[in-house]
Amino acid sequence: MPRTSEPTRERILSAAAKLFYAEGIRSVSVDAVAAKAGVTKRTLYYHFKSKDDLMAAYLEGRDQPNLALFQRWFAETTGGVADKVRGVFRNLAVSARHPKWKGCGFLRTSVELATMPGHPAMKAGVAHKKRVEDWLRATLEAERIGNAATLARQIILLMDGSFAVVLLHRDPSYMETAGDAAAALIRATAARRV
Amino acid sequence: MPRTSEPTRERILSAAAKLFYAEGIRSVSVDAVAAKAGVTKRTLYYHFKSKDDLMAAYLEGRDQPNLALFQRWFAETTGGVADKVRGVFRNLAVSARHPKWKGCGFLRTSVELATMPGHPAMKAGVAHKKRVEDWLRATLEAERIGNAATLARQIILLMDGSFAVVLLHRDPSYMETAGDAAAALIRATAARRV
DNA sequence: TTGTGTATATTCACTAGACGGTATACATTG
DNA sequence: CAATGTATACCGTCTAGTGAATATACACAA
């Protein structure tokens, strides 16, 4: 069934996303993605000009949904900002307990491409992380918390730290610990509000 | 000139370490390591039974030196524990400014092997991180700081977080920010000593 | 001292497969 | 017809790992 361009492209992208997240970008071959999408490799190369292009598209497609998830977790947690941020970490811990959890796709991709700073997928990773940090900073500012920029950075550090550490030790309780640290830092700062 | 077994093995290991750290374990071929060591691939396979074996040996060889470095940075910084921990982060920032810096070799290797939890190199990474955390906990306990275990975890989270974030954004100032957060957490806890 | 056996250490040449990417041709639709 | 999309078959390259042969150093015997 031809003339199905958009669906086909989406199917390829979705297959790529699943495989890249589950097994890493380098170890997944273009053939594997094509097979999973039920498409010939030639068709894949019709919709994406290279594997690098596909990698970048994968991360770009995950940017908004991921940020939206964090925002939802934040909004759904009751209490003050500190509690809400801790709520995000608690939800991260819940996801990390899922057997298919494999850390943060952006972070893992960036590590796999660490030696290619200009790579489009790398740029997508950088942009996403910046976006999350910006959202955090703006949120803290809206709550009239001083040093929002620094605090947002520290929370991001704890968040990415927990991605890395939990991926290593496979112990999601580190995420709760990170959430406690984030809450403590927020409260310590909030004590001397602007 | 035979009967030079040890030097040869060491040369291979050293070449592997340099290449693996600089370019990542997956993207460095066994041929590249052998070439860099000035040895035939067959000789490499005489000293190491597989590439996986070589990878594990690489990380195992970095464990002690790395921990010793942290300990030296800690010892060389004057002031209280909070200052000393911040000193470690400050030194991390200095290293990260070196053009050849490519993050934490243990973390990057673990990410590259994220889908192979039982891999020997993965085990070496886990063991190293645990060792650093244990040293931190013991050090905090010696200073009679309460909740030393939790605090050590939080510092580790900030440390690994800064490895990841700085590798992404190439902005070592995140490490100073992480150091500040660590110091703040220590001081907040130290205020209510055991 | 010379010869010989043996474990250690190293080389050259090779295989079998996977990989990213492509040349060419065919089908469907407007 | 012309544009879009899909399929088969293929290419050159790289990769981890191996088979067979060789060189060295040393222990021991004559």
Image: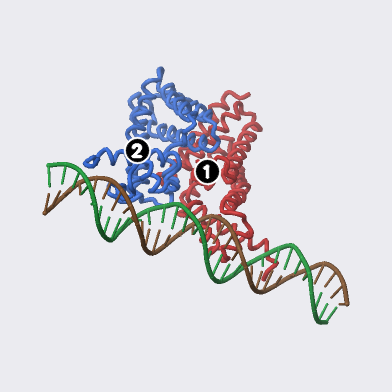
Chain colours: A blue, B red, C green, D brown
Instruction: Tell me what residue is drawn at x 64 percent, y 58 percent.
Output: B47
Q: Residues within 10 Å of mark 2 (few under 14, many from 20)?
A: some
Instruction: Tell me what residue is drawn at x 53 percent, y 58 percent.
Output: B30
Q: Is residue A111 above or below residue A170?
A: below
- Residue B90 at what x, y percent from top left? 51, 43
Residue B59 visible in rendering: yes
* Cα–Cα span, label 1 and label 2: 26 Å
Chain letter of disc 2? Answer: A
Q: Is residue B101 left or right of residue A33?
A: right
- Residue A168 at what x, y percent from top left? 53, 38
Q: Is residue B135 left or right of residue B103?
A: right
Instruction: Tell me what residue is drawn at x 41 percent, y 41 percent.
Output: A19
Please tell me if label 1 and label 2 are on a single chain: no
Residue B77 visible in rendering: no
Counting the numbered discs, the total is 2
Q: Provide the secondary structure element on which disc 2 rests.
A: helix
Q: Which mark is residue A14?
A: 2
Q: Is residue B16 left or right of residue D10?
A: right
The quarter of the rendered structure image containing the N terminus of chain B is: bottom right
Q: Which mark is residue B5?
A: none
Q: Residue B70's image quarter?
A: top right
Chain letter of disc 1? Answer: B
- Front residue of B96 and B153: B153
Q: Provide the secondary structure element on which disc 1 rests.
A: helix
Residue furthest out toward the top:
A78
| Pointer 1 residue | B110
Kind of residue sitting beneath label 2:
Ser
Q: Is residue B148 above or below residue C7?
A: above
- Residue A34 at what x, y percent from top left? 36, 45
